Image: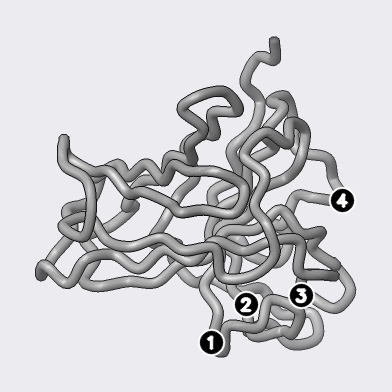
Amino acid sequence: IIEDDDVNLTTPRWGILGMNHQEPMELSIVALDNISTSRVYFTASDFNRETLAFDQDNGVIKFVSANTGCIPKGTVFTISGGVNGPLTVNCNGTSGTECGEATIESGTFDFTDIGTTLYAYSDLNSDPTDTQVTIQSVLNTLGGTISPAEDISQFYANAVVVDGFATG
């Protein structure tokens, strides 16, 4: 948690790899470390740099990894589904509960929304609008460079900022 002018140096556990806006609509994430059971959230809500919280609840996906012991660093997961769910999780050539469970926690999550900024974050209390969040990764779904207003590395120094790739 960040207070005043502090910088959060938490090592991120999850990184966003990309998002497919066409069938199959899916979000790809990667384990950045060896991880035991973990919970991570994804949202396209705007992040307020003054309050260090999300401005509104535009739709939140909650992913809980399977309780299988240790998820090896580098394991890639895909979360696919429709705007209102249900969602399917795939990993290592399998799908279903062996990989974990993803649910739309609130609102709707629009996989077809191109040009939004997508955040992966952990949350102490499941409320993305308070300051109990730690951002782990950010991706602009259109490509190109993250705008200064959306670049959270000033506050979350170790967060994975996915940008700089070609568009179109």
Please determine whether, in this image, residue 49 is positioned above or below residue 71: below
Cα distance in 3D space between marks 2 and 3: 7 Å
> Which callout, 3 or 1, points at the residue further toward the start of the chain?
3
User: Quarter-wise, where is residue 75 in the image?
Assistant: top left
Could you say which disc has been placed on residue 53 in the image?
3
In what element is the residue under mark 3?
A: strand
> Which callout, 4 or 3, points at the residue further toward the start of the chain?
3
Indicate left or right for 55 with 76 as reference.
right
The three-letter code of the residue at mark 4 reads Ala
Q: Nearer the viewer, mark 4 or mark 2?
A: 2
Cα distance in 3D space between marks 4 and 1: 24 Å
> Which callout, 1 or 2, points at the residue further toward the start of the chain?
1
The three-letter code of the residue at mark 3 reads Ala
Q: Judge by depth and name the residue closer to the eye, 100 or 10.
A: 100
Q: Which residue is mark 1?
A: 124
Neighbour class for label 3 at 10 Å: few (<14), some, many (≥20)? many
Q: Which residue is mark 4?
A: 149
Q: Which residue is mark 2?
A: 133
